[in-house]
Amino acid sequence: MDAIECIMTRRSVRNYLDVPVEWDKIGTILDTGRFAPSSGNIQDVKFVVVKDEGSRKAIADACLRQYWMSKAPIHIVVCSEVKKSIGFYGIRGERLYSIQNCAASIENMMLAANSLGLGTCWVGAFDENVVSRVLGIPDYIRPQAIITIGYYHEAPKPPQRFPLTTVAFLEKYGNRVGDSAAVMRDYSLITERYVKQGQKATGNAAGKAADFIGQKGQSIAEKLKKKFKK
C-alpha cells in the first residue's frame, strides 16, 4: 500500500490473535521509529521491546488495568532521554520537544506496522513509576507511551472524523475556506458536484442544440430553394 492508504487505514486495535510477531518485522518497525524527525536531530527517543508474558501483564496492570493489552504479543515502550533534551533546550526541551519527538516515532512505527499487516494501539494512560520499575528504566529516562503490536482478528470500523472545514483554516485561525473542496483538492466532492450540474444542464443543452440545428437547417433549406429557382 502507498503512504496515503497506510495512513487512512490505520486503526487502534485492541483484539489480538495468539500468534507471535516475526522479529524481522519488529526490527523494521523499530527502524522506522529511529528514522523519525527529532528536535535538532538530538535523537533522544529510546525503545524497550517487551515480549515476556509476565512483564506484559504487569504493564497492562500499570496501564489502569487495561488487561486487553497483555494479549498483544509485543509491547514497545517509547521513552525519552530527558537529560539530553534538557541539556540542549532546557525546560522547553523537557516539557515539549521530548514529547513531540516520541510522538513522531510512535506514529512512524504504527504506520509501518499497518503496512506489514499488523495492528497497533497507542496507550498513554499508565503509572510511569511502575512501568519504569518493571523494565528497569533509569531516572533520567521517561516512558512516554506504550505501543501494543500483534496480528488482529479483524480491523475495527473507521471512526468518525470531523470534516476538514471544521479543523483547517486559511491564513488566520477560524477563517474557514468558502469552497473547501476546490481549495483542498477534494476531487470526489468536486466530481460529484459537476455530475449533478451536468445532469441538470443536459435537458437545457439538448433543447438549445435542437433549436440551433433547426434554425440552421431552415436557413440552408431557404438558400437551396432560392438557388434552384434561379
Image (cartoon, rainbow, N blue to C red):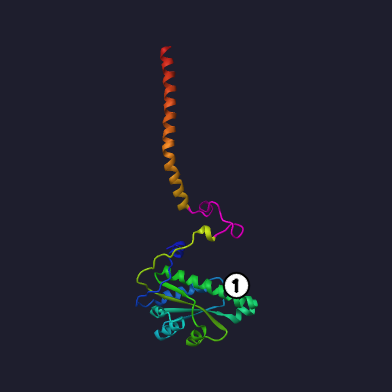
Dominant secondary structure of the residues highlighted in magenta in the image: loop
Q: Residue at x 51, y 83 (%)?
A: 128
Residue at mark 1: 39
What span is in magenta? Answer: 168-186
Whether the magenta-drawn stretch holds residue 178 is answered as: yes
- The percent coordinates of residue 3 (x first, y second) are 46, 63
Q: Which residue is drawn at 42% across and 27% down?
A: 214
Whether the magenta-drawn stretch holds residue 82 is answered as: no
- The percent coordinates of residue 137 (x first, y second) are 52, 85
Q: In this view, does 194 lie to the left or right of 97?
A: left
Q: In this view, does 155 lie to the left or right of 88?
A: left
> In which image quadrant can residue 212 be found?
top left
- The percent coordinates of residue 217 (x first, y second) are 42, 25
- Is any part of residue 88 visible from this angle? no
Tell me the kind of residue under disc 1: Ser
Task: Indicate whether 187 appears above or below 119.
Answer: above
